[in-house]
């Protein structure tokens, strides 16, 4: 990390556009039944089960806006770009089957850099069993841009939208919150240290979980499988990319309901708690506003309480109330404060 490895550099121009596409994509294999034709023609051909619905989602990542290559290795970037898209597919309760990958790249990147990026994309495609079926390659005058589109399938009866939560439902999350945000803070801090002293070695021992959550997030395909096993179809679902509070607000606004969240129920990793103490930050604020957790947030009927309650991968953090009751966080001190997109209200007042 932070070093300029002096490996060989092959100019992109030496391969040409078609040579480059071929070079980067020749290792991709088709494994999905629904992929009739992948890379190589004007368009890919897909053939889905007529009983299923198809979901499609796209995310674009821009250098300097969504990632910083001084601490984000290209292989991790490739992996993460796929994860952020698959996470959206799982959030529909669907199973991803194909992705397309489009890149805009400047000639400051050698072919070797794109090989790294594609190694990460391939690792993700292999691990999540999705076919890379196409994309586009173009030049950019400045930074790197990656746009990935993911396609998935779901039973019409099981598709989970954002606008279907009902009063009385329980609010459930997978995993824990705030770690990826803190991972970014740790990496930013090390980058500043490195700028002053290029010989310094980053000391990331204490923050391994945080850094991993930032650099190598995993989309929660296991939760989709778990819900199927538990025979639970969420009444609504969203993935947590922008921060827990912001996603809860999305579900509530779109479903025209309110909510009560309980501060003491929000799952936190011990590294998040310790690092918040070290950085003098409030762990609840970080968990609610941090973002990039790529966990799933969903609502279930109260009848499903017993199925969810004992599960170690899931936490019930609140419940849905009437729209007129508003959106609130019940703090550890048992006070009720309005939930806002960036954390919760009483903190804003302290800032
Ligand atoms: P067209 O001129 O029809 O747009 P391209 O030359 O852009 O075709 O692409 C040729 C083939 O390679 C197509 O199947 C396209 O989907 C695929 N492709 C192009 N760029 C990428 C990429 N960066 N990653 C994966 N597949 C790509
Ligand atoms: Mg093209």
Image (tube, grey):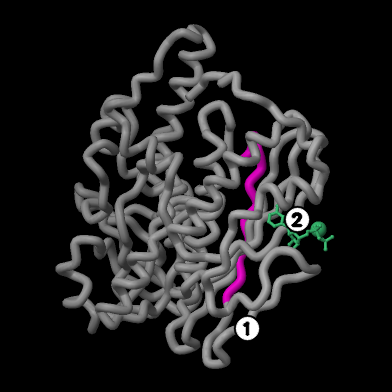
In magenta segment, residue 218: no
In this rendered view, identify the residue nearer to me: 249 or 185: 185
In this rendered view, identify the residue nearer to me: 22 or 347: 22
Q: Which residue is mark 1?
A: 47
* Residue 239, image x, y percentages: 45, 61
The structure residue drawn at horizontal position 39% and vertical position 35%, both measured from the top left corner, is 211
Q: Which residues are magenta?
A: 55-65
Left or right: residue 80 versus residue 43 is left
- Circle 1: element type: loop
Identify the residue at the far bottom of this view: 51
Q: Is residue 332 above or below residue 273?
A: below
Residue 10: image quadrant is top right
What is the crowding at mark 2: few (fewer than 14 residues within 10 Å), some, or many (at least 20)? few
Q: Gap between marks 1 and 2, in whole Å?
A: 22 Å
The structure residue drawn at horizontal position 31% and vertical position 60%, both measured from the top left corner, is 174
Label 2 CB, ligand 2: below 8 Å?
yes
In this rendered view, identify the residue nearer to me: 338 or 28: 28
Residue 227 appears anywhere in the view: yes
The structure residue drawn at horizontal position 36% and vertical position 41%, both measured from the top left corner, is 179
The structure residue drawn at horizontal position 71% and vertical position 59%, both measured from the top left corner, is 135
Q: Which residue is mark 2?
A: 136
In magenta segment, residue 57: yes
The overriding secondary structure of the stretch rendered in magenta is: strand
* Residue 161, image x, y percentages: 49, 76
């Amino acid at each position: 990390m932070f070093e300029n490895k002096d490996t060989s550099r092959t100019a992109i121009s030496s391969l040409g556009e078609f040579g480059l596409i071929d070079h980067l994509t020749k290792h991709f294999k088709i494994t999905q039944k629904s992929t009739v034709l992948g890379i190589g023609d004007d368009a890919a051909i897909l053939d889905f089960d007529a009983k299923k619905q198809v979901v499609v989602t796209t995310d674009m990542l821009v250098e300097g806006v969504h990632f910083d290559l001084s601490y984000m290795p290209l292989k991790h970037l490739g992996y993460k770009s796929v994860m952020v898209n698959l996470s959206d597919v799982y959030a529909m309760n669907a199973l991803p089957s194909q992705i397309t990958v489009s890149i805009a790249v400047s000639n400051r990147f050698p072919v070797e850099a794109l090989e790294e990026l594609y190694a990460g994309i391939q690792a993700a495609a292999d691990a999540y069993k999705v076919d890379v079926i196409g994309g586009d390659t173009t030049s950019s005058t400045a930074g790197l841009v990656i746009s990935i589109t993911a396609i998935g399938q779901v039973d019409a009866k099981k598709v989970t939208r954002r606008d279907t939560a009902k009063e009385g439902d329980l609010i459930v999350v997978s995993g824990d919150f705030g770690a990826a945000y803190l991972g970014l803070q740790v990496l930013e801090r090390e980058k500043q240290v490195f700028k002053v002293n290029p010989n310094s070695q980053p000391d990331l021992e204490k923050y391994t979980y945080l850094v991993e959550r930032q650099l190598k997030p995993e989309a929660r395909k296991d939760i989709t499988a778990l819900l199927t096993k538990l025979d639970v179809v969420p009444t609504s679902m969203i993935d947590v990319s922008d921060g827990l509070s912001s996603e809860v607000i999305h579900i509530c606004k779109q479903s025209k309901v309110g909510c009560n969240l309980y501060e003491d129920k929000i799952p936190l990793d011990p590294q998040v708690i310790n690092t918040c103490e070290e950085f003098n930050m409030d762990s609840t604020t970080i968990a609610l506003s941090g973002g990039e957790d790529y966990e799933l947030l969903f609502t279930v009927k109260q009848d499903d309480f017993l199925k969810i309650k004992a599960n170690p991968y899931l936490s019930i953090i609140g419940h849905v109330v009437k729209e007129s009751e508003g959106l609130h966080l019940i703090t550890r001190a048992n006070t009720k404060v309005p939930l806002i997109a960036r954390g919760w209200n009483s903190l804003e007042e302290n800032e």
